[in-house]
Amino acid sequence: MIDLHTHTTFSDGCLIPAELCRRAAKAGYSAVAITDHADHSNIALILENLLRFVRQAGPFLGIDVLAGVEITHVPPPLIPGLIKTARELGAQIVVVHGETIVEPVLRGTNLAAIEGGADILAHPGILTPQEATLAAQKNVALELTTRKGHSLTNGLVAALAKAHGARLVIDNDAHEPGDFVSLEMRKKIAMGAGLTPEDYTQTDQNAQTILTRAPRG
């Protein structure tokens, strides 16, 4: 299992990076991306610290770890530029906090994230067919999430992704130890969103592709 969307004490998670990685490994995950909530005020601080952690501790964690950010509640016109900034600062993965129906995310955020070339659009909420089509064209993965609240629109996201050829990944949006769901629960959530077993296998392959293509060093 791979989880490309997690949070530590560098934003609103309750675990420091070392403990998050240890608990993910114990839960059966082979790789995680640490993607703490970022805007213009803290993106450099987050990435400086997470990249140092990955460089120094990564070889000893027993799990593959990426340092990244989740660009969160940033005004849509500023999102593409901040994605570029994150990559210039060394982010190995860039996630954008999508238009989940349980938070007041500005309309236009999904489109800005896709146009800006994020790696993953997290919990996109009421995704449109046009956004799904563009995500397929831009190779931006759409997230099905196991997280309470955000998961309410998984079915719509899955249906639109399948209809328009967009890639899907499954993430936990983990903030605390109990958020690392089991393989059995991940599969149940995928099936509940309308995925077939073959679709589920493809989500794993999509996550592995993102992991493999991430810059290292």
Image (cartoon, rainbow, N blue to C red):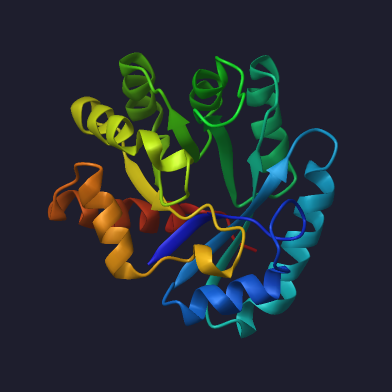
In front of the other: 43 or 156: 156
Residue 183 on image: x %, y %: 32, 69
Q: Is residue 42 left or right of residue 135?
A: right
- Residue beneath the point at 31% across and 21% down: 133
Residue 85 on image: x %, y %: 73, 35
Q: Is residue 164 left or right of residue 92?
A: left
- Residue beneath the point at 70% across and 78% down: 57
Residue 173 on image: x %, y %: 53, 52
**Count of numbered labels shown in the rendering:** 0
- Residue beneath the point at 82% across and 45% down: 44
- Residue beneath the point at 44% across and 73% down: 30
- Please identify the quadrant where the C terminus is shown: bottom right
In the image, residue 214 sits, relative to residue 58, either above or below, namely above
In front of the other: 69 or 146: 146
- Please identify the quadrant where the N terminus is shown: bottom left
Q: Is residue 7 left or right of residue 119?
A: right
In the image, residue 163 sits, relative to residue 55, either above or below, namely above
Residue 109 on image: x %, y %: 57, 21
Displayed quadrant of residue 73: top right
